[in-house]
């Protein structure tokens, strides 16, 4: 193991590993520190509880980096439609990939599958070292030369320290970066179920007064559940036995896919919106959940993180190309200006949707259902919403753009 690197990425999950792959074509010496490496997938394995909805733009990034084939050879499930409806009225919107001339709206991928495919690619690069089995004991942030101490006492130094270590980031804390917090007072319940009916390669979401309930398709015909509920209600649901929970789930989902035949173990996590007041300092940068967390109702959390990684790599690679300091405040500030606005827009949009659909005022409910039905009748409105969900809109990094986007717009990278 080396002791001195150009870049140390603390956190080798989905976002940190994507950044490592995106920087690997440079001459930088990179270390990725990740204690927990998942075991390889066996086709007979149960599905993981945590899955992500991967957008077209995120798939484009992963395909460019040579990662997508590793996902496909394991397992993932494309979804061709999305059906959204309100439990407090008749409002409903159905999005269909065929209406946009694409094969699918996105893919549901287990987090473990995505991480494994990324780690495969990391192993193919000689200038990227994966340090596994060791957690970080201490971080000494210094603008020009930070030091990371592992639990075995090994000390590693770097010019650029990257926090890709999640919502409770040690890197963020070491840099004394504060958070803007908004506790939704909800928990997200996750599990895997097998309903009577096939999911029809559709992502289903019903908005309940206590929070949205999503059924996400898996390749086996099962569904991954994300049920956002007020904290007290979530605790009651977690305490139920499997049979009682299945009945409650079927009722909450309006029996859309019939009876729930089986349900896996359940887990829950608190839903909190977090946004770092700063993404960067000289020689330090935050990506993914270390910089921001949002409500899961649209499944955009990991997509924001992957765009962070691709955008940061683009900024850094351009600095290197033009012989500028890749870790300077001036260079990293380009990344912060780029991503902060994009992330904030999505965060506020999700909070707005959460508040709108969680309001049981009769007048607001009527207006909400009217709005859903108007969107369903408007091809233009549906197209705009689908393009945003698929990641076709916004200020995208070059490697996230489809060929038609590259031809339609400037391909010049950021300076």
Image: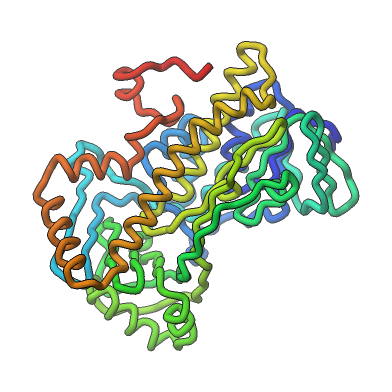
At a point 37% along the width and 49% down the height, the residue shown is: 107
Task: Name the residue located 32 percent from the left edge and 84 percent from the top edge.
Answer: 247
User: As rendered, which of 27 and 168 lies closer to the eye?
Assistant: 168
Horizontal side of 158 relative to 327 (left or right) equals right
Q: Is residue 365 above or below residue 146?
A: below
- Is 16 drawn above or below residue 259 in the view shown? above
In the image shown, does 228 or 127 lie closer to the viewer?
A: 228
Res. 125 visible in picture = yes
Classify the position of the N terminus by image quarter: top right
* Picture quadrant where residue 217 is located: bottom left
Which residue sits at x=20%, y=38%? Answer: 100
Residue at (37% x, 62% y) in the render:
220
Which of the two residues, 254 or 121, is positioned nearer the viewer here?
254
Looking at the rendered structure, the number of numbered marks drawn on it comes to 0
**Residue 161 left/right relative to 83:** right
Residue 399 x/y as whole percent: 46, 27
**Coordinates of residue 170 in the picture (x, y in percent):** 72, 51
Residue 401 appears left or right of 145: left
Above or below: residue 37 compared with residue 140: below
* Along the line of sight, the residue nearer the viewer: 262 or 50: 50
């Amino acid at each position: 193991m080396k002791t001195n690197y150009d870049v140390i990425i603390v956190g080798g999950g989905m976002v940190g590993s994507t950044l490592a792959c995106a920087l690997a074509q440079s001459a930088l010496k990179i270390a990725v520190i990740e204690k927990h490496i998942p075991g390889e997938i066996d086709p007979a394995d149960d599905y993981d509880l945590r899955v992500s909805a991967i957008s077209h733009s995120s798939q484009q990034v992963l395909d460019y980096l040579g990662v997508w084939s590793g996902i496909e050879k394991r397992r993932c499930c494309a979804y061709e439609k999305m059906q959204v409806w309100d439990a407090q009225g008749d409002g409903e919107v159905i999005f269909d990939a065929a209406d946009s001339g694409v094969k699918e709206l996105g893919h549901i991928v287990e987090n473990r599958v995505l991480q494994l495919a990324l780690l495969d690619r990391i192993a193919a690069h000689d200038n990227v070292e994966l340090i596994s089995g060791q957690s970080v004991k201490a971080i000494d942030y210094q603008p020009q030369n930070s030091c990371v101490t592992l639990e075995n006492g090994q000390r590693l130094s770097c010019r650029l320290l990257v926090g890709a270590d999640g919502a409770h980031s040690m890197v963020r804390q070491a840099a004394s970066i504060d958070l803007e917090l908004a506790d939704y007072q909800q928990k997200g319940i996750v599990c895997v179920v097998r309903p009577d009916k096939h999911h029809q390669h559709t992502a289903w979401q019903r908005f309940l007064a206590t929070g949205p309930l999503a059924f996400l398709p898996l390749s086996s015909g099962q569904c991954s559940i994300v049920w956002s509920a007020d904290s007290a209600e979530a605790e009651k649901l977690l305490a139920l036995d499997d049979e009682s929970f299945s009945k409650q789930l079927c009722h909450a989902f309006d029996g859309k896919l019939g009876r729930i035949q089986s349900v896996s173990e359940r887990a829950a996590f608190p839903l909190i919106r977090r946004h770092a007041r700063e993404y960067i300092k000289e020689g330090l940068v935050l990506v993914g959940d270390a910089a921001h967390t949002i409500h899961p109702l649209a499944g955009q959390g990991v997509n924001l993180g992957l765009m962070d990684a691709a955008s940061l790599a683009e900024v850094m690679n351009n600095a290197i190309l033009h012989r500028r300091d890749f870790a300077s405040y001036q260079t990293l500030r380009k990344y912060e200006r780029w991503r902060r606005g994009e992330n904030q827009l999505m965060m506020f949009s999700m909070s707005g949707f959460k508040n709108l659909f969680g309001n049981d005022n009769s007048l607001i409910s009527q207006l909400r259902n009217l709005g859903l039905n108007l969107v369903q009748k408007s091809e233009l409105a549906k197209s705009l919403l689908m393009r945003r969900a698929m990641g076709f809109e916004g200020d995208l990094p070059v490697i996230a753009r489809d060929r038609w986007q590259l031809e339609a717009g400037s391909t010049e990278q950021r300076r």
